Amino acid sequence: MNYLRLLSCCVFALSSAPSLASADEPSLGEWVQHRVEAGILQPLAAREVSRFSRARPPPHERRVRVTQATPSRDKQGREFVAFAVDVRFGGNWQENDIVGCAYRSNGALFVKRGDGYFPAAFLLGKSVDRAPGVCEPAPARS
């Protein structure tokens, strides 16, 4: 009988203790920042053109800003978080050089060009089609 009482006390104590696994997970903002750095900024830096090219020179520095604290849901109910990439060519930062969103469920990154959103591979010169319905919040329910 004492064994069952001890076992039930241990089960109760373990179930009421906070989980330590969540302490290792990055916050939503940190996750988006790391995902954008790995999926967009590092490939762009590896692809930079030489200084003798007529293309736009690479920026001296890039930074990622997460532009919303909580995720939004698109029309299909998938959660995404908006971000912006700022660039610095000299002393001043130019905001919103790249604007897009990251989907938490699969890590997909999309960037805005014109009125639509495209997969981030677009920035690396890949031929991709516009992705309809992504990064657009679902209308609020009344």
Image (spheres, grey):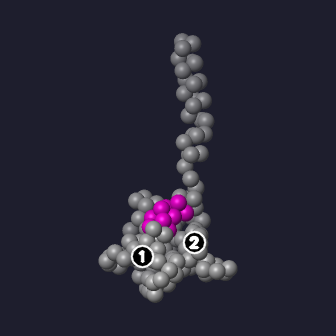
Residue 35 lies in the magenta-colored region = yes
Inspect the image, locate mark 1, and give the three-letter code of the amino acid beneath it.
Leu
Q: Which residue is mark 1?
A: 123
Would residue 65 appear left or right of 74 to someone viewing this image?
Answer: right
Determine contact: label 1, label 2, CB under 8 Å: no
Q: Which residues are magenta?
A: 33-43
Residue 80 lies in the magenta-colored region = no
Residue at left offset 60%, top offset 29%: 13
Residue at left offset 47%, top offset 78%: 50
Q: Residue furthest top?
A: 1
Residue nearest the viewer, comparing 3 with 116: 116
Residue at left offset 47%, top offset 83%: 52
In what element is the residue under mark 1? helix
Q: Which picture quadrant has residue 23? A: top right
Dominant SS in magenta = helix
Q: Residue 108 appears at what percent x and percent y? A: 41, 65
* Residue 138 in view (yes/no): no
Indicate which disc residue 28 carries: none
Q: Earlier in the sequence, mark 1 or mark 2?
A: 2
Q: Which picture quadrant has residue 60? A: bottom right
Q: Where 92 falls versus 40 (above or below)?
A: below
Residue at left offset 56%, top offset 46%: 24
Q: Which residue is mark 2?
A: 62
Within 10 Å of disc 1 (Cα), the crowding (few <14, some 14-19, many 20+) is: some
* Residue 23 in view (yes/no): yes
Q: Residue furthest right?
A: 91
Q: Residue 20 appears at what percent x and percent y? A: 58, 40
Q: Residue furthest front?
A: 52
Inspect the image, locate mark 2, and give the three-letter code of the amino acid beneath it.
Arg
